[in-house]
Amino acid sequence: MKVVVLGSGIVGVSTAWFLARDGHEVTVIDRASGPARETSFANGGQISVSQSEPWAQPDVPWKVLKWLFREDAPLLYRPMFDPAQWAFCLRFLNECRPSRAEANMRQILALGRFSRATFDLIRAETGLAFDHRERGIVSIFLSQQELDAAAHAAAVMAEFGIDKKVVSRDEMVAIEPALAGYSANVVGATYCESDQSGDVHRFTCGLAGLAEAAGVEFRFSTRVNALLAEGGDIAGVSVTGPDGAFATVTADAYVLALGSHSPLVARTAGLSLPIYPAKGYSATLPVIDAGAAPTASLTDESYKIVMSRLGERLRIAGTAELAGYSSTLNPVRCRLLVERARTIFPGACDWDAAQFWTGLRPATPGNVPLIGRTRYPRLWLNTGHGTLGWTEGPGSGRALAELIAGRDPGIAFHFQGC
């Protein structure tokens, strides 16, 4: 079967890889000049199954109100005259109900575990190098209330075999000695030994190269204009090539994996996807003292910031900004990342050499991605992974390839289109 995958981030490339393994003729189309050039370019680096609590939690609406006019808020909401933004926020509030929050977490956990097994499969088969570390994730808490909530979530995760546990400050320092100088500020921590970290850009580019060698065609610098609906199905995709010429690409099946831009393209075929861009930031700094820099990945829960060691670099990422499709760097939020990392690991990096980046993460109201067939028989979705695209991308690609082949992926996840 001929399959066109729209998008070459971690989700799209993983989908193409597993479709090609199934013997399909695969073409990947992306407006960027190469794979992983947008949301999959410089994220926080965490492969974090244990970080499966959705953003939509019962206490979050009150926090958002408190943060509303703070430029350095972990979750910054900028009200706009944008119906899509208001619709997303209303759905988000509904997902904050306790019953919905726990149901969503179970979905995310199931997909995350499947994806972690898929990572192991890809690594064993390909030997890809991507600054990979298996040192787990330490999450630090500055208040007892936050630590108690994390302990409850860890207990739920234990039902799924996730080895996340509460640890004391001394245990935290034993796991990550670089935290010794900051430990007095911490109430407690959690630790998940099975979590991992690595460079999503390097991984995706490496997998794309292997996919191309296996016969996948990549068409870069090619803009997706519209899905062409005809007779109750998708008859093709309108694109503009690097030479500026319009063309129509046809196939037996189409996979929409364009991240935050998925709803814009879906709308051309009359489909409404509950996805809204959540702008995230990152800073990448050179490590100048290896002993002062962490080797385990770190999550600072109070500030919603993550830090991962990528070779001789430290990647600091986080915050979420609901401000439409703007990719403008906010200097206040950039400084927050660097200042927070310098507070915890003061001698680790050259703090004046930060490389800043921002990307639009495709968020659904409950943080559960959309994976499955739409009402158009030839059109499939693999999008809406929010902050967990690196964690869930390989598994999502494998699962969708199974669905397209008519097989059951064998995980407790509600596969759905629209």
Image (cartoon, rainbow, N blue to C red):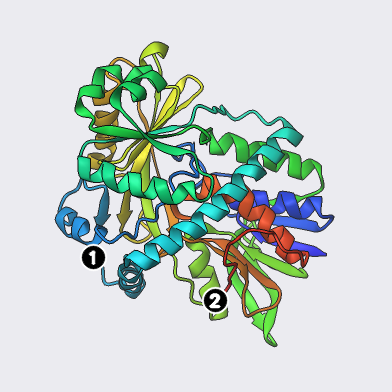
Viewer-side residue, 180 vs 283: 180
- Badge 1 local density, few (<14 within 10 Å), some, or many (20+)? few
Q: Residue at x 64, y 43 (%)?
A: 117
Q: Residue at x 40, y 59 (%)?
A: 277
User: Does 319 sit left or right of 200 as displayed?
Assistant: left
The number of callouts visible is 2
Viewer-side residue, 318 vs 164: 164
Q: Which residue is mark 1?
A: 79
Amino acid found under the numbered disc labelled 2? Thr
Mark toward the viewer: 2 or 1: 1
Q: Position of residue 417 (x, y in %)?
A: 58, 72
Q: Residue at x 59, y 30 (%)?
A: 130
Q: Position of residue 212 (x, y in %)?
A: 76, 44
User: Does 68 sit left or right of 111 as displayed?
Assistant: left
Q: Which residue is mark 2?
A: 268
The CA distance from mark 2 to mark 1 is: 25 Å
Amino acid found under the numbered disc labelled 1? Pro
Q: Label 2's element?
A: helix
> Residue 3 occupies which quadrant of the picture?
bottom right
Viewer-side residue, 383 vs 354: 383
Give the position of the N terminus as an image quadrant.
bottom right
Position of 344 relative to 85 (above/below): above
User: Does 75 sit left or right of 208 as displayed?
Assistant: left
